[in-house]
Image (cartoon, rainbow, N blue to C red):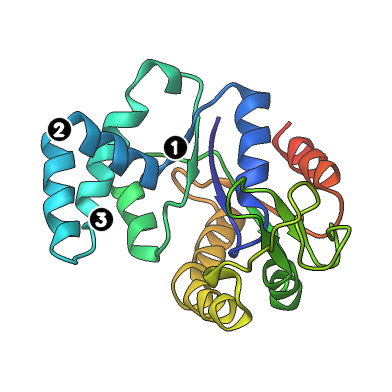
Amino acid sequence: MRIILLGGPGAGKGTQSSYISERYGIPQISTGDMLRAEKAKGSTLGKQAEEIMNAGGLVPDELILGMIEQRIAEDDCTEGFLLDGFPRTIAQAEALQDKEINIDHVVEIRVDDGEIIRRMSGRRIHPASGRAYHVEFNPPKAEGIDDETGERLIQRDDDCEEVVRQRLAVYHEQTAPLVDHYSHWAEFGGAGAPEYHVIDGIGPIEGIRDQIFSVLG
């Protein structure tokens, strides 16, 4: 089973990816993780990517596609894989098609912007341990204080409301068009057309997980 998971920042893709990977026995393939692994191995692809990133550039789609092709040829991808963080743009989705990397299911976890801002801007972290809280959903016993150490909690820079809004703007501009791309392809069919599923991302984590399992079968 070959799966792409779509959704805005804070929609819960990371949590649900872990459930899907475990349930179906398929690896979660993160382009970020692959880049780090290739750099660590000192491979040709890794060296090329490192040179580009060190120069402040973006790793070209063709290089990323090359790493994905290598990765899905490995033995643990025999039964399929879950793409995490790729594709991010229409060009990348079309590149997958050009490489004949067919996808069986595209799952969109849909959460409106207001809820995502509420989720992310309310997060608080204990820096030393990584313990996470939320001002509404999982507040500490004392406001702004870690339950175990009594130390101050922080709000990460990328959880500030202004930054969350910026991330959402980038998502809507670059990645959200993939929703139309894959949903229309699934609706009208054609060679390699995937099934497209919309999951309500509001509610208990386990309930969202069960929705996904239900549509994947």
Q: Nearer the viewer, residue 50 or 214?
A: 50
Left or right: 101 with respect to 167? left
Estimate the spatial distance between the alpha carbons at disc 2 and disc 1, rounded to whole Å: 18 Å
Left or right: 7 with respect to 207? left
- Residue, disc 1: 29
Left or right: 51 with respect to 58? left
Is there a contact, CB below 8 Å, between mark 2 and mark 1?
no
Left or right: 124 with respect to 30? right
Residue 43's label in the rendered image is 2
Q: Amino acid at mark 1?
A: Ile
- Residue, disc 3: 61
Where is residue 182 shown, x and y percent of the image? 53, 58
> Which residue lies at the image location 20% right of the left edge and 29% below the top edge?
41
* The N terminus: image quadrant: top right
Quarter of image, res 206 = top right
Where is residue 201 shown, x and y percent of the image? 76, 57
For label 1, the SS is: strand
Mark toward the viewer: 2 or 1: 2
Q: Which of the marked residues, 2 or 1, is nearer the chain's N terminus?
A: 1
Answer whether residue 15 is visible to the viewer in this image: yes
Q: Amino acid at mark 2?
A: Ser
Estimate the spatial distance between the alpha carbons at disc 2 and disc 3, rounded to whole Å: 17 Å
Badge 1, how many Cα within 10 Å: few under 14, some, many 20+?
many
